[in-house]
Image (cartoon, rainbow, N blue to C red):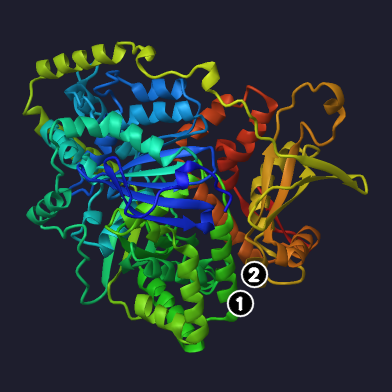
Amino acid sequence: MSMKHDVYTMTKNQNYKGFTVLDCKELPEYDALGIWLKHKKTGLEVFHMACDDKENLFAFSFATPPTDSTGVAHILEHSVLCGSKKYPLKDPFIQLSNQSVKTFLNAMTFSDKTVYPAATVSEKDYFNLMSVYGDAVFFPLLQEWTFQQEGHRLEVDEKGTVSIQGVVYNEMKGNYSSFEGVAADYSVSGVLPNTIYDVDSGGSPEEIPLLTYENFVDFHKNHYTPSNCKVFLYGNISTEKQLDFIQREFLDEFEKNNYVPIDTKEIDRKKALEKGRIPWNEAPRAFDSPLFLEKAAPAGEGDTRGEMVTLSWFVGDSSDPLTSMEATLLAYILMNHDGSPMTRALLESGLGEDLSPNCGIDGEMHWLVFNIGLRGVEKGKAQQVEKLIMEVLENLCNTGISKEDIEATLLSFDFSQREVKRSGGPYSLVLMRKTLRKWLYGKSPFEGLKFLETLKEIEENILSNPDYLVSLVKRMLLHNKHRVLVAVRPDEDYGKRAAEKEQLLLNTLLKTQSLETIKLRQEALHRIQQLEDDPSVLPHLSLEDLPTDIDFIQTERKYIDSVPVFINEEATKGIIYGTVGFPVDNLTPEEYKLLPFFCNVVTSVGFGGQSWVDTALRDALCTGGFAAHLVTAPFEESEGTAKNDPTLDRDWLFFSVKMLQNHTKEALNLVKDCLMSPDFSDKKRIQDLAREYRNDFLSSILPLGHNYVASRVGRFLSRSKTVDEIWNGFSQLETALSCRIRERATGSFCFSF
């Protein structure tokens, strides 16, 4: 290991000031050392993945299992960042965002936990962020106006009409307008009834207005405590320096006030039992027989996509590394690519349009849920979907799982462990979530990082026991009675009924306060909202605090038969990334509209003389991913030699592949065959891809509506933004919705719009 720093000197059972080292282990898979500590007086736990990465990350995490759908955990996540003891601003989060060089800054409410992560490459900035975040979670002001703003309140408009308002309330109204989101929730609540996962930690619009300010404050008092806090640290800042900071800035205050650790688990247990729910650390009660549920979810006007049918199983404890990886292994074998046994059977069945978006493992909860399903299913055919799924499982048990499917799955596992990539933030966020999935439920944080060790155990089981995988299919799925079949239909009246319920709730709330009181509170809130924060209250960076070194990716440019080739040599854990690009700015405007769907199709059909099924398996056996995508670059006036560079200021179609070194030849041949001989003659395959493309677009409207609006508005700012809107905005949605296949006289097929 290349780590050379005093941060790595701690040993197990060592005492450092108020902390005891519970364990200390090398993590060679991550080029890091794990240091797990516990503060003796308050019970706060810290886990530091110490490494040479200068992009440091911290996260304050709290177990916040809900017992109802009032959304208290979600509202609190918003509210603690609205002013604290040391930083009494009304919106320190926004101010901090404006004066930090952070690489990540956010807060997240999960179904049973709340997490506050931040990352930066500046050490001074790091401790500034930690100071503000730590003070926010431990010592928030939680004034009543904050609760009204972030949670719920009554408000009167100019016409005298009263409505329910609130940041979280309106956010969740939007969430409950998503067909896929509501349908997925039914599957979880259906297979885990009477548990904390049967309610919504984010909050239901029907229950959020029932939350009182007193219960809101009590939830913070009982859950945002050091004894219920897990602090994840990552990076090259010394453990000692960070512990000193945490002690000085936060824990000293608790010790000064003679803090006694709170038994949050016992509080949650009592509340769960009072409400007839299973405490969150107790396994759900086993089903005597499978269940079938029919539900409704919001649909757009004229929505004819059919039902979403999902078969969901409870398959075990997510905090057990072996159980978790076994369930993931089965999901990969069954549905890793379009040619996988379950995916292929469902897509070719004609029972639905495409797979349910929630297919696979839901591993962010204490209990693992395994989902398989279809969307676009004709009403009344849910049982046929279930029958097909069970038949596929039974056939696998009778005939065995093919060697190719096992190899493709293990290769996918290998890539998932090797690859370090940013996805909405630094890679350390992935590691944070891995540790919390075990740590939060009473296991060691190291358990979440035991990938290679657990994978080795599984590989040995496969080699030593020919029936190992079949036995997993039988135990977890085929013979598992703890499952539920959920058929969710799009209902155009869903929104109307929700509005009627909202009006009834509003009428009830109006009986508790007068119109005059509502107006007075509203005016008081608006006065506070209009006050300007003083950003100087927050810690600042000076010029000398900023890092002076700049990371460059060294690029070597060569030519092969006048074609430019760019070579980058970086440490990528044995993964080779290859990209082939073609300029597309010589195409017509009409052809531009077709390019996004072409990208979606061209790597998903057959090529090299093989069917799409065989090609999908071939892809899975030699790559970690092969896809086509589009890139548009600004057309700006270039200077010097760049002005005549044919690779700059262009719109491009890229084919990207990632491969291990020992699979380079097979992977590059795959790319060559895709470029030279794609086969678009399978009409049904292209129709299926078109429906999937359309459905994915429709599902993205509600959660990403603000992005579509921004893209639409910004399309006049530059040519590049115009192209981006054509490819990714409402213009492309219109293209996807109008897509149809027509047959040429030659017998081949083309698309028209």
Q: Is residue 687 above or below residue 17?
A: below
Tell me: 190 left or right of 615: left
What amino acid type is highlighted by mark number 2? Answer: Leu
Give the label on residue 621, or none. 2
Q: Which badge, 2 or 1, is on the more N-terminal residue?
A: 1
Tell me: 45 left or right of 342: left
Horizontal and vertical percent for residue 637?
A: 78, 21
Q: Residue 247 versus residue 607: which sits nearer the camera?
A: 247
State the residue position of label 1.
404
Give the label on residue 654, or none. none
Give neighbour class at mark 1: few <14, some 14-19, many 20+ (Cα, 10 Å): some
Q: Residue 412 versus residue 436: which sits nearer the camera?
A: 436
User: Which structural element holds mark 2?
Assistant: helix
> In the displayed image of the protein, which residue is found farthest to the right?
561
Question: Marks 1 and 2: in contact by CB < 8 Å?
Answer: yes
Residue under the point 14% across and 31% down: 257
What amino acid type is highlighted by mark number 1? Answer: Glu
Tell me: 668 left or right of 560: left
